[in-house]
Each structure stands twice: as structure tokens, then as C-alpha cells.
Amino acid sequence: MRMRGGRRAWVSALLAAAATWWASAGPVPAQDGRERLGAPRADDGQSSRKPAARNRKADPNAPAVAAARRSDDQGADKDATLAPRPARETVEADVSTRTIAVTSAFAGTEIIVFGSVVNSRQPSAEAGTYDIIVVLEGMPIPLTVRRKTNVAGLWINTDAVDFESVPSYYAIASTRPIEEIADPTFLERNAIGHGYARIAPAARSVIAAKPGEIRDYKEAVVRIKQGDGLYLKEDYAVIFIGKSLFRASIALPANVPVGPMTARVYLFREGDLLSTFQSKVRLERSGIELWLYRAAMHHPLYYGLSAVLVATLAGWLASLPFRRRPPA
Amino acid sequence: MHIYLPIAEMSANVLLFLGMGCAVGFLAGLFGVGGGFLMTPLLIFSGIPAAVAVGTGAAQIVASSASGAIAQYRRNTVDIKMGLVLLAGGVLGSVIGVKMVRILRLAGQFDLFVSLAYVTFLGVIGTLMLIESLHAIQAARSGAPIARRRSGQHNWIHKLPFKMRFHRSKLYISAFPPMMIGAFVGFLGAIMGAGGGFIMIPALIYLLRMPTNIAIGTSLFQIVFVAAVTTVMQSTENYSVDIVLALILIVSGVVGAQYGAAAGARLKGEHLRFLLAALVLLVCARIGWDLIVTPPELFSITSLGGLR
């Protein structure tokens, strides 16, 4: 509840900011969300997806700033209501838990991403007017991928490709298969889908590798991550509950790498992107887990010495009950 | 019943690891080995990252060896003087070994090196012990005079300088061979995530001609300290010691080791060596199999996050 109140204040503050910006619209550096919504209004809602896609390409960080722009969508909608055409749909969403505590009892959990389509024109939950794609992505981490080949009968790591950034976790939930919702160009530009996740090889590896080889390694990353349960894809996991309310449940396995996560929500109608939303999820160690992890990473010497001490003590204590046995 | 491991970053079944610790602890106490050569592969098979398995294994060896060493000490089978000489070499070997782990891991050849080291040493030592123990058992059965250690026997080892008298082992030899054995075992132990008892004990028995029971006790004594140094080194160099996992293994391991040590006292030396040889060869075969058979996934991913 407290969070909702804060959210309302936040939205209205941004609304005010948006209004100010609108008044002084001029040679301000082009912002993705603004342009994206500006374009469809200019050509009356036709072919909104293409400009959106183009502008997204111009700004590779688009998803990262999309959330802040959402208020612009609303601002624009308020303006639009003056015109004699139905209000434009936008999406509002949030995650069930913003901060997930990883304690000693952590055995995986699930996050509910829920939200609603503002100005929904959908007659019922089953109508299928809108498509939603939810992407939950972990922080990017560097990885080395190695390939074994058979050398004199033994399987040995012979080739390697370094990747500068690979999403540590990547889950997609959607109302139906994402390939049916949007075209491949859009998916690729927005890094939606395991095949389009931002898996960036290091420059030195790209130079050293043979053409086409990097793709094998990329596919291997996705395959291994899928096998570990860290790359997930649920085609029908986003469910409409009413004509505007939807929810999706996304599993976080116990081996999920601890760190910040980003949830992105995309709203589509007949293949056209209408609106996006972004939220942060934090996965944090807490309690004794945090304490031990910090000790191990920041004071490794003391941690190591204590580990030996604790181990010796445990070994000695456990041998005490056996003390009375006569020596063999 | 699950618990989240802070360094391994995964949720683990407590009962599974308690059982594993108990079983390995029993064998460790029985044969006087640290149990690391069983524990490390078992941890890796159960999904613990290799780096964490090796690091945590060292901490677990400290505890299981400590309780085992106490049991051995009470049975008066520890040659302290010999143990200290072995230890001097062992610490040096361990320091070099942990550095080597880091280099190999960065080069991506760590797993291969570990497997090859295991196959080579487990194979050679297991085969030698198996043959020797079978001869001894056969000799004992046929009633032939058992080839006891002849104190008058000399080889090149006895011609080296800096001779020391080891009363408990009934030896008068140079300090160099034990120190070299200690260094070699310390080095391999750090790389293989094991205390190295399975190499140390045969070396003491067959190279230095120590009595089996004294070799077991002394080996266990020095392993406690070498494993302690390795634990600290793995913490500072590789950030790979998971104390929560270690405690689970320790609690079960020390209890198992006590029963193992008691059971070992009731078994004959040659039978003990035969069983150890069979176990060593079994682990060797299992690891060797993985090197030869085509892996289902040719690619592997490594995050070097912990190896900055």
C-alpha cells in the first residue's frame, strides 16, 4: 500500500515534468519514448511500430530508460483525449517483490509481474486483443565459453571464446509465442528472446574466431543456460484476468545469480507496439548469508583462518563423545 | 530440507550432503586418508562448482583429519618428528599448488589437469597397492613366513646426508626424502582438492619403509596442517571456501571418521591396503571414463567472477 502511494506521487511528479518539457519542446536531445509516441500521433496511429523500432535502434539503451518515459505516454494521452479518437492504450505494471532476500532458506522463488492496460478496448479477458511480453533479465556478466575436441582419444578444451556480457538470467513470458506477436527485427532490436539476448563476445575473440564460429558459441551459452534453468521461456504464461488486468508468474530457480534484475513489459496490438514499461527487481543476500559472503570476499584471509579454526573446533568437538572408548 | 550455500550460490539438500560426509568420513577414518580424493569428485558430481568443491574440500579435510589424527594419536601411531619434516615440505608444495590452480583455471585446462592427475596417481598407486596386498594376503593364507620389514635393508635413500633418527618409525634416514615427499604431496593435494593421503601413505610405506599403522597416523597428522594452509590459500586466492557446506560435511564427516578409525583398528594391514587399493582404482576408472567418452555437451561456460 505504502508503495502504491509512493508510486502515485512519482507518476504525478513525472507528469508535471512532462508537461513542462512539452511546453518548452525544442532542440532538446531526442528521447526515445517521446519520439516513439510523437510519430504515431503525427500519422494518426498508423504504422506505429516501425518508427518505434527505428528509434529504438538509434538508442540502444532504450529499454533502460523506457520506464521513465511512460509518464510521457500518459501526458500524450491526456492531450490526445481532446481529439475525436479513442484514447491510446498504455501499459502499467509492477512486480510482486521489488527486493528478494537470499537467506539460508532460499530455495528459489517466483516473481509475479502484474499490470493493466490503460484505456483497454478489449471486450473480455479471452478476446485476445492485446499481446503482452514480459522479459525478466539478470545483470550482464562476463563469461568464457570453451569447446572440447578429441585429442588423441581424450576430450580436451581446445578453443575458447570470451564474452564481455551475457545476461546471468533471462526469462520471457508472453500471451502467445513471441514470434507470433512481433517480427524478428523488432525482437532482435529489443533483445527479446533467448536467440536475441544481448550476448556480446569480446573484441579479441571476434577477431580470432572463424566466421560463423561465434554463433555456435552463442547458441551454446543459451543451451547451457537453458539446461541450468536460468534461461526460461513460457509462451502462454501471461494471462489476462479482466479486460485490462494481466499477470505473469516467473520462476527464479535456487541457482539464480544474485544481483539486480530488470523486468520489461511490452504491450502489443496486432503486432504494433503500443507501450512499454520497466521495473527493477533486486536479488540481495541478507542475514547470515550476506555476512558470510562479505567476509569471504572482503576479508578472505580472516575468513580462511576462521574457516580453519571452525573446522578444527568442529572436528575436535565431534571426537569428544568417543573419548571414553578404550584405545584399540 | 534445503539450505542456501553463500559461496557456491546454490540451494543444497542438507540430508544428501550429510550422508555424503558421513560415508566419506568413515572411509577417511578407516584408511587414514583425508577423504578429499573421494569428496571432491562427489561434490562436483552433485552440482557444486569445481572451484568451490576443491576449496571447501580443503576445509572439510582439516576437520575430518583432525578428528582422525586425534584418534590415531591416542593409539600412539603418530611419528611427530616425521610429521613435522613432511609438513615443512607439504606447506611449500601447497603454496605452489594453489598458485598453479589459479593459472590452470585461467587457461581453462584445470579440469583436464585434475582428471589426468587423478587417473595417473590413483591408477599407479591403486595397482601397486592391489598387487602388493594380494601377495601379502596370499602369503598369510598359505602360512608362509610373512615378509616383515627387515631393518637391515638399505637402498640409495639411506645414503643421503642430514640423517635424522625417527624413533617411532624405527628409521634412521636423511630428512630430504620425507621433505620431498611432503612437498610433492602438498602440491598435488592442492591441485586435486585432496589432502594427498592416498599418495603419502604408499610413499611412506614403500619408499621410506615405515610400518603401515605409523604411516597412516603420521600422514593424517601432517594432512591436518597442510589442509589448513590450503584452506587459507584457497580463501585468499580463489574465494572458493564455502563454510556452510564445509560445516555440513564436517559434522557428518567427523562422526563417520571415528567409526572408520575404530573399524580400521580391527582390520589387518594387508586387508586394509587391499580395500583402499580397490577404492582408489574405482575412483580412477570413474574419472578416466569421463575423459574418454564423448561428452553430451562439448561446450562449457566458466564465469571468472571469483578469479579477479
Image: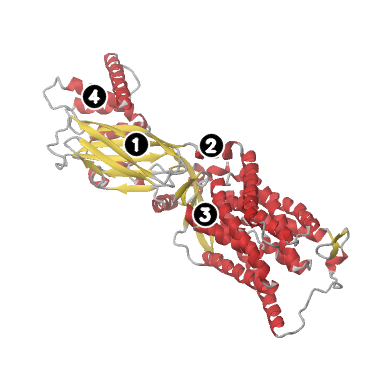
Q: Mark 2 points at which residue?
A: A291
Q: Quick check: A141 above or below A315? A: above
Q: Which amino acid does label 1 sit on?
A: Ala
Q: Which of pointers 4 and 2 indicates the residue nearer the eye? A: 2
> Which quarter of the image is occupied by the C terminus of chain A?
bottom right
> Hey, which quadrant is residue A169 in on the image?
top left
Q: Which of pointers 3 and 2 indicates the residue nearer the eye? A: 2
Q: Mark 1 points at which residue?
A: A263
Give the left or right position of residue A41, taking residue B274 as reference.
Answer: left
**Residue A74 shows which numbered tag?**
4
Q: Name the residue under label 3.
A: A159
Q: Distance between the residues labelled 1 and 2?
A: 28 Å
Q: Distance between the residues labelled 4 and 1?
A: 20 Å
Rendering coords of residue A276 (x, y %): 28, 33
Q: Do labels 3 and 2 share a chain?
A: yes
Mark 3 or 4 closer to N-term? 4
Q: Mark 2 lies on which chain?
A: A
Rendering coords of residue B54 (x, y %): 59, 53
Mark 3 or 2 closer to N-term? 3
Give the left or right position of residue A167, taking residue B195 as reference.
Answer: left
Q: Which of pointers 4 and 1 indicates the residue nearer the eye? A: 1
